[in-house]
Image: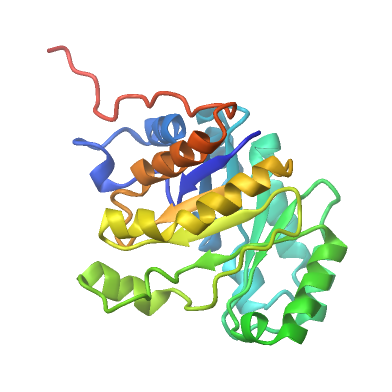
Amino acid sequence: MRLYVGCAMWTHPDWQEKPLPPAERLRTYSSWCNAVEGNTTFYAVPQRRTVESWARQTDPDFRFVIKLPRTITHDRRLTGVDDEMAAFLDAIEPLGRRLHSLWVQLPASFTNLPALAELLDGLPSHCRCAVEVRHPVFFENPRATAQLEQVLTAAGAEWIPFDTTVLFDGPPVSPAEYEARSKKPNNRRRTRALTEYPIVRYHGRDDIATTVAGWQPWIDTTVAWLREGRSPTVFIHTPDNASARTLARRFHAEVRAHLPDMEPLPDPLPTDPMTLF
């Protein structure tokens, strides 16, 4: 049984007293969590040498869920993107087995399932893929839900739920919660896995107790998935993400309390630079 947990980034100002050198940030993060969302690739295709450094800093069992560039998903809306996809796949190739899944995050206005099916069908057979949709129709209309599931199942792709139900349960209490609510979707919680590798994005609140109480349905679901032989990945978000890394480890520990035979996470590396005194 293998559970992957992580955050939306591998560096955060609150995660160390003094800034770590760039070459140490991912290495240190990977001792806390065994997966990470690759959000930076949404804004720009990384240089191949940059991706090579990501691979050097992480164990072969570490996992990246890498987001497709916005030029593919939002600007071109999956149409006429063969050259862009080829360049992107070449750039991230150094990750090797560390690439857990390509992450197709679609605009909130996107409903073009034929374009999605064509993109998924054109991917290399070794590329696992997961799709995050945000249009309400896929959560509220059973016919649309079934059509999307059919497209994903045919391609062996997963549906990534972004669970923000706790974030939107009650009024915001801080500027960070206001900002998060202005940017995140507010759709129904979805807990059905389509593949062996389900991926969940869970968003909590500023209050840790509220965040932990809100993820209890995911504890039960994750335990059930593991018992079924699946290998789930769960990413923990909070409004400012200052506590996300610690909370990701807590989620893993809560699941392991139900499944003691599951491998524990490693002990984290120190987050402060070494000094002579």
Q: What is the tally of numbered marks visible in this picture?
A: 0
Of 202 and 219, the residue lying toward us: 219
How far across and how far down the image is residue 185, in percent? Answer: 48, 76
Residue at the limit of the structure toward the front, as seen here: 258
Task: Look at the image and tell me whether residue 195 can be seen.
Answer: yes
Q: Does residue 129 appear left or right of residue 5 in this picture?
A: right
Q: Is residue 180 left or right of residue 99?
A: left
Q: Quadrant of residue 195?
A: bottom right
Quadrant of residue 168 in the image? bottom left
Q: Is residue 91 visible?
A: no
User: Looking at the picture, how far across and down is residue 131, in whole percent?
Assistant: 67, 65
Looking at this view, name the residue that lies furthest to the left: 277
Tell me where residue 58 appears, x and y as whole percent: 53, 30
Identify the residue at image location x=26%, y=67%.
Answer: 176
Q: Residue at x 53, y 37 (%)?
A: 258
Which image quarter: residue 253? top left
Q: Is residue 255 above or below residue 84?
A: above
Q: Is residue 132 left or right of residue 144?
A: left
Image quarter (top left, top right, bottom left or bottom right) of the N terminus: top right
Task: Name which residue lies at 44% across and 73% down.
Answer: 184
